[in-house]
Amino acid sequence: MKSSTFEKTAYSEIREQLINGTLRCEDRVALFLERIREHAALNAFLEVFETRALRKAQEVDQKIAAGTAGRLAGMVIGIKDNLCLEGEICSAGSKMLEGFRSLYTATAVQRLLDEDAIVIGRLNCDEFAMGSSNEHSAYGPVLNPLDPARVPGGSSGGSAAAVAAGLCDAALGSDTGGSIRQPAAFTGLVGIKPTYGRISRSGLIAYASSFDQIGCFTHTVEDASLLIEMMSGGDPLDATTSSVTPHRHAAVLEDDPRPKRIALLKPALDHPGLDPAAKAHFAEVVEALKAQGHHVEAVDFDHLDQLVPIYYLLTTSEASSNLARFDGVHYGYRATGTESLEELHKQSRTQGFGTEVKRRILLGTFVLSAGYYDAYYGKAQKARRMVRNWTDRVFADFDFLMCPTTPHEAFALNRESADPTVMYLEDIFTVLANIAGIPAISVPTGLGKNTLPLGTQIMAPAFFEEQLLLFSRQFHSQFRVHN
Amino acid sequence: MSDSQDLSAFEPVIGLEVHIQLNTRSKAYSADPAGYGERPNSMVGPISLGHPGTLPVVNRAVVESAIRLGLACGCTLRERNEYARKNYFYADLPKGYQITQHTTPICTGGSIGLGAKHGGKRIALTRIHMEEDAGKSLHDLDPFHTLVDLNRAGVPLLEMVSEPEFTSGEEAYAYLTEVRRLVRYLDISDGNMEEGSLRCDVNISVRPKGQSAFGTKVEVKNLNSFRHVQKAIEYEFERQVTLIQSGGAVQQQTRTWDSVQGMTQVLRSKEEAHDYRYFPEPDLPPVYVGPGWIEQVRTQMPALPEARIERYTVDWGLSPYDASVLVEDKAMADYFEHLVALHNRPKACANVLNTQIRAYLNQNGVELSEYPVVPERLAALLECIESGSLSHSAAFQKILPLMESGQTAHPLSIAEAEGLLQDRDEDRLRPIVLEVLEAYPAKVEEYLGGKKGLLGLFMGEVMKRSGGKADPQLSSRLVQEALEAQRKS
């Protein structure tokens, strides 16, 4: 099964037909529902909101007829299973929240619904968004639609697989250390993680609060731009959101002929883990940029190998606290037959969480404990500030910072390793943007040695989504034609 | 226990941690309502319940309460306020952590005065910080289950930590009394210890007098009245001294006060102490308390007791004693000021509050907030006395009790119904006056001869013959006029 099998129409390409009535939302939803059934083996959807989606499609068709439809009228989206939708189950890919129904809707999802997007279902993911292969879901692994023997990446693997397989127009994911960009690269999609604080996290089940950010998977940068604009902006329910004016979608559609100053992350290109085919592909990308007149320059960075340790020390610390609420008392999984409150806590958490989640909770608990805090958490915080200062310096001289999104193509399922840090190194090129809080996008630019997609990552200064998306659109169009 | 002889060789070193539950309308980090005495689990939304995906947002009213208290205590206010998570598992802590302040408390320094009885001693404050309350675990309502009420989860608290400067339970009692008065004046808390609005933990150690090093510290919790705080301190002092004198050593412990047995008991030892794994709260950016905000809060601060005493004595002419009695309780001072605003006779207002109303409150064992007569109606009564429609005695002995028992008519209507209205009709009173003078010709002669004191006799007769209703002032004038008329004739 190769990518050509799948419908890859972007929303922006069919919107006109929806608005002039030649395509009906209800028919499109029915078609997607049919495809979802056909591709059930991918295990991308944990639940399909059939009734809800058809009802909303009918409502949007009426609004289109009345000329009152919103800017996402009829866009069919799937949401990662860690985003809340009132009345629906949200389980974060965990047995801990099996059957748990949200009391409210995530701000980001609500903003899309308000613009008449249609939510068609919830998508599989690594448990509590912890993982880089989507093999850590309590509901089974997701298969890569481009090669079912391979992983789609993670943690937002279900979101990537669903869009890549044409089961919906776009999907929401969350990105804490690369959980959108890496699966987007593995499935040939555009995946963006906006600036930290750009999109409200209210209703996103927290993994690591100071890293988590909602973003999306789309076939095109245009669609990504539209979705990100709709979700962006301050939210009274999330004190970490910024009220900096979101980018204008229209501006992203204008051409910008000016050459850019582009920094390449040198140690990423020299990294021993970088697959030669991926390295060669990236060299082609660089040559193409130079040929267009952009100024491209490799910049050194001494701490690439420290990024993953910094990331894991801080994210597991926050996770150990964020996941304390799953204690078997108020909601979610509860162990039976326990004799005391402490035993109830212990057994519920032991039975309800998967191995990877427990590993990270234990690591974070250790990092924060008395006597170790300064040596680990405190030091990692300082290192995080140093990394931020470094990106600030880079962006004083450059418009963008680029490197491959991942060291290689999608890898095989069940690539078991006794050492979990092997999997942690999958994030080596992506965690930088989360540590620094800057926006980053993965754009599909070519194919690797197994003719599976490779992505190029572009990072920009905080809140420069407009420039990032505009550049990425031009960049992507070049490589779409190219491929 | 040992006798006092032995105790006198030692001194206690005591510090207090007071948790002040704030009276904000919503919770510390959410818009869920905050309130006491509501149906269990009725004051909760997804945030109070700690549901997945929920995030805290700082309630500015909590920061303003902290600024108020800080200004009133002369603290240094911190500009950049960070929040921290204190992690522990308990059934009534839905998030598994409490959002508090750790290394950056909003207030540092400052002090609380213990009052004249303690020679004006002031207790220095270490810090005041903002945090949220947990819910309540109810162990005694159901024989087989512990029930959890999350109404209190997320309700804002200020934790006020003193320096270890107390040397007796009495001082602790005076401190708590002052803290309660202060928070009520600042209108940041109802200050009711019984309802848990003020909670106090005691840190106490002992040392031989003259020694500068501190002894081993014991923390005492579960103190739900000022009296228990005082008793627990006295008990612990004796326990620790006796332990040392008998060759033992004080263990670092957390103990709980058993009010039934009047003793402290071990809750947990040092080894069992929690590791709270504090770290900066990533969901809340720091809150900046700048000079502009502080000034804005300062201008909105209610007048504190000292300022009110000055106004009452200097501007309104009250005696220092009357003034200080009124300001003891903010509710009383507020009632008084409200009353004066309606009836501009501060002395008369102070008198009725300090005598009649205080007597009512004492007899009925109620707070001023439960006093049935609102200032508007009391002012109307005072107006009737002022205008002469009611005598002082009729007003306070007859009419006010009827108003207190629930009569809602205007005092004049009540007086009329009870036949207590003063007669101010000159045409009706003048014949009575003449009748009295005719009945006592000899006394009239004596009066005219200079025995002015006889006026009281004539007045008494007039009151008697008018059935007690004659307006005294008016009658007095009529009697004197009639007497002077006789002198001329």
Image (cartoon, coloured by chain):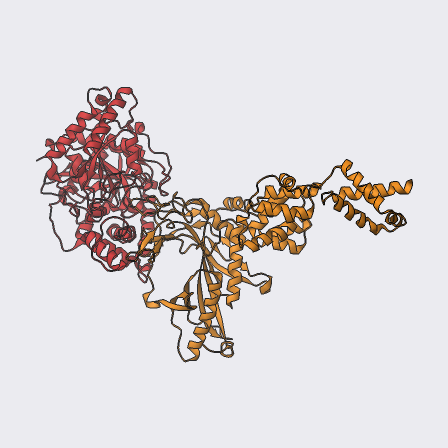
Chain colours: A red, B orange
Query: Considering depth in this image, is A475 or B271 the residue closer to the camera?
Result: B271
Res. B315 visible in picture: no
Q: Determine the image quadrant of residue A469.
A: top left
Residue A345 horizontal side relative to residue B351, left or right: left
Name the residue furthest front.
B439
Query: Considering depth in this image, is A16 or A26 the residue closer to the camera?
Result: A26
Instruction: Name above or below for residue B58 compared with residue B139.
Output: above
Query: Considering depth in this image, is B80 or A355 the residue closer to the camera?
Result: A355
Query: Considering depth in this image, is B134 or B87 the residue closer to the camera?
Result: B134
Q: Determine the image quadrant of residue A79.
A: top left
The quadrant in which the N terminus of chain B is found is bottom left
Q: Residue at x 34, y 45 (%)?
A: B47
Name the residue furthest left.
A1
Instruction: Name above or below for residue B123 compared with residue A100.
Output: below
Percent x, y for residue B132? Answer: 39, 51
The quadrant in which the C terminus of chain B is found is top right
Residue A359 horizontal side relative to residue B450, left or right: left
Percent x, y for residue B406? Answer: 55, 44
Name the residue furthest right.
B489
Res. B418 visible in picture: yes
Q: Residue at x 57, y 44 (%)?
A: B374
Percent x, y for residue B182? Answer: 53, 54
Instruction: Name above or below for residue B272 compared with residue A140.
Output: below
Percent x, y for residue A124? Answer: 18, 42
Counting the numbered discs, the total is 0
